[in-house]
Amino acid sequence: MEFYFLRHAIATDRDASPYENDSERPLSKEGVKRMQRIARGMHSLGLSFDLVFSSPYLRARESAELVVREFGLKSSVRFTLLLEPLANSRQLVDQLKKRKGEAQSVLLVGHEPSMTSLISLLLSGEENLMITMKKGGLCKLRVGHLRKGKCASLEWLLTPRQLSRIE
């Protein structure tokens, strides 16, 4: 299986936000533009996704929906609380294992620190690898047998700037 981890694009400023709940902060105008360029770069790489999961937070949902639109995917985004910022990586692995027969290529759209915690868990068996994933960054892991521990190999980790430059 292939897993792609996409961190949401730039959101409106938390301190200047009129939203009481952090989960309601949308992408900024610049975040939308960048995510559109990132999605085009992803598409140019020839990627495909059988399933798309996203955090229910608005900025992650908007990022996932921009990718789905760019790819012309008929399947809709599935939302899970297990992709929220402080979600439990091991519980997410359990949820993904239940879906393994449905897909060979899965896109997960979420936040820090949960994205790199999950990547770290799958690469090393621990959740503390030092991984920098910028907003709009994309990571690809290849997984043989999905489990809560070392089971993946890192194919690549691209920055938003790299993705935006792919045509």
Image (cartoon, helix red, strand yellow):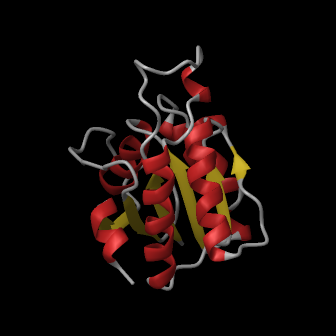
Residue 8 vertical position relative to residue 66 in the rendered view, above or below: above
Give the mark count: 0
Residue at x-position 47% and y-position 28%: 86
Say which quadrant the N terminus sits in: bottom right
Inspect this view and state whether residue 116 appears: yes
| In this rendering, position of residue 22 left or right of residue 9 | right
Furthest residue to the front? 29
Q: Position of residue 74 (x, y in %)?
A: 79, 72
Q: Residue 86 versus residue 22: which sits nearer the camera? A: 22
Where is residue 43 drawn, in percent x and y? 51, 79
- Lateral position of residue 115 relative to residue 126, left or right: right
Q: Residue at x 56, y 41 (%)?
A: 59
Residue nearest the viewer, comparing 1 with 15: 15
Left or right, residue 75 beside residue 140: right
Q: Nearer the viewer, residue 74 or 96?
A: 74
Vertical arrangement, residue 158 with respect to residue 90, above or below: below
